[in-house]
Image (spheres, rainbow, N blue to C red):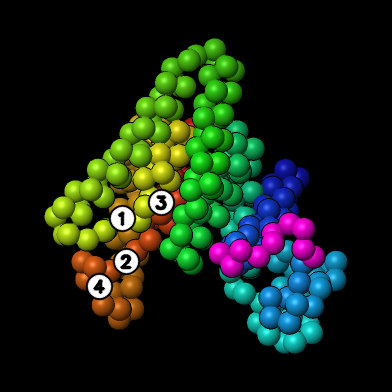
């Protein structure tokens, strides 16, 4: 119970930072060195206003100075981060690794959903941590097979989406995949191996269909050109696959 609570709190803090990254990174604003301030009036935040989730609830989602609404994504990032922290403790065999993967995926999922943007550096970081995970696991179990599977998974994930993108381009004469999608699935493959890549693709497809169905029921027009952010679907699908694999 204590550990679940710790995961929850740690996740909320990490999520709070990711919310700042999510809102500021695309504008090229400084992330770390600047004091936290209201995005509208630039009023510096008091220490108690930095407490994730709770401060939102107390302030009613508004800046105390200018009354402008605090970006909803900030709260979403904090809630998502907290949920991942708690779930990793409850369901994960290796909670710290599960958190490390989950938080990175959450940030990438939100960046793609909000900005249609998957920064290569973040995918590279995800891939590097996946390779490290395979190395540590392989060393710990004294079995180098896992490292080989990780590398194959990385290559397979990247190649699968890259070829899909090329094929789509030849068929439709337009770009169907974002350039950031193949590196993302490659990085996921380094964590999950080739079978995990297949499971992630399947789960992402089902999730995409479910989302499309919900949008359609809500009265939105769905055509073959409807853009669903593939990166978001992949990132959301990959985490349960990781846990399901027994990690
Ligand atoms: Zn303000």
Task: Farthest residue to the right: give it.
Answer: 47
The residue singled out by tag 1 in the image is: 177
The residue singled out by tag 2 in the image is: 227
The dot on residue 106 is none
Helix, strand or loop under label 2: loop
Q: Is residue 33 shown in magenta?
A: yes
The residue singled out by tag 4 in the image is: 222
Q: Residue at x 41, y 44 (%)?
A: 183
- Measure how far apart labels 2 and 4 are at the Cα level: 9 Å
- Measure how far apart labels 3 and 1 are at the Cα level: 8 Å
Kindly tell me whether mark 3's CB lies below 8 Å from ligand 1: no
Sequence-wise first label, 3 or 4 = 3
- Measure how far apart labels 2 and 1 are at the Cα level: 10 Å
Which residues fall within the magenta stretch?
Answer: 26-35
Tag in front: 4 or 1 = 1
User: Could you tell whether 94 is left or right of 159 in the image?
Assistant: right
Q: Residues within 10 Å of mark 4 (few under 14, many from 20)?
A: few
- The location of residue 136, given as percent across then percent down, is 58, 23
Q: 22 and 67: which one is in front?
A: 22
Prevalent SS, magenta region: loop
- The location of residue 89, given as percent across then percent down, is 63, 42
């Amino acid at each position: 119970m204590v550990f679940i609570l710790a995961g929850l709190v740690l996740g909320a803090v990490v999520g709070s930072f990711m919310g700042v990254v999510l809102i500021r990174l695309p504008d090229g604003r400084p992330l770390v060195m600047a004091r936290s301030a209201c995005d509208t009036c630039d009023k510096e935040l008091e220490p108690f206003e930095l407490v994730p989730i709770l401060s939102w609830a107390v302030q009613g989602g508004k800046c105390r100075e200018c009354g402008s609404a605090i970006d909803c994504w900030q709260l979403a990032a904090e809630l998502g981060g907290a949920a991942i922290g708690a779930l990793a403790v409850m369901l994960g065999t290796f909670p710290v690794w599960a958190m490390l993967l989950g938080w990175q995926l959450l940030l990438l999922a939100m960046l793609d959903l909000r900005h249609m943007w998957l920064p290569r550096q973040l995918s590279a970081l995800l891939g590097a941590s996946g390779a490290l995970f395979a190395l540590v696991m392989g060393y710990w179990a004294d079995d180098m097979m896992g490292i080989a599977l990780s590398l194959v998974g990385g290559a397979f994930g990247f190649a699968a989406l890259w070829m899909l993108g090329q094929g789509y381009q030849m068929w439709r004469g337009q770009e169907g995949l974002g350039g950031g999608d193949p590196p993302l699935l490659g990085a996921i493959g380094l964590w999950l191996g080739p079978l995990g890549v297949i499971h992630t693709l399947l789960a992402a497809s089902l999730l995409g269909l479910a989302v499309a169905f919900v949008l359609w029921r809500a009265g939105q027009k769905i055509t073959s050109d409807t853009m669903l952010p593939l990166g978001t679907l992949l990132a959301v699908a990959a985490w349960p696959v990781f846990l399901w694999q027994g990690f």
